Amino acid sequence: MSDDRTADELEARLSEEDKQFLDQLADGLVRWRLTSVALFFLEWWKPMNFVTSSQMVFLRPVISTVWSDPQRWDRVTRLLEERGAMELLLRRLEARA
């Protein structure tokens, strides 16, 4: 199944809250001027989105000590477990670039 089709199907299934969260994530990356880095990273890791989310689960204890809102980390992890989530974030970033 193509990335575009998978992403389109995921977009249809996501709640409005999850869509807004992806928008906020993209807006934050743009605001911090990390668009190019984020695009490179997401394109590079897109085929391994589940591995990426698994690494995020592994890093959770460390993140919870330094990040004031680790629940946001958990939400990103949960979203990235879904095939097509990186493509959705890429689309949002490219629209803002």
Image (cartoon, rainbow, N blue to C red):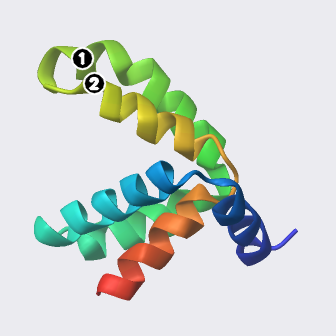
Q: Residue at x 31, y 57 (%)?
A: 25
Q: Residue 72, image x and y in percent?
A: 32, 34
- Residue, far right: 1
Three-letter amino acid code at disc 1?
A: Ser
Task: Quadrant for the N terminus, please.
Answer: bottom right
Q: Residue at x 38, y 52 (%)?
A: 21
- Residue, far front: 16
Whether the residues at callouts 1 and 2 have beta carbons within 8 Å, the answer is: yes
The residue indicated by pointer 2 is 70
- Quick one: SS at disc 1? helix
Total numbered circles? 2
**Left or right of 58 in this view: 30:** left
Q: Is residue 47 visible?
A: yes
Task: Quadrant for the C terminus, please.
Answer: bottom left
**Left or right of 55 in this view: 87:** right
Q: Residue 20, image x and y in percent?
A: 39, 58
Q: Which mark is residue 64?
A: 1
How many neighbours does mark 1 have within 10 angstroms: few (below 14), some (14-19), or many (20 or more)?
some
Q: Is residue 54 above or below residue 79?
A: above
Earlier residue among tags 1 and 2: 1
**Left or right of 35 in this view: 44:** right
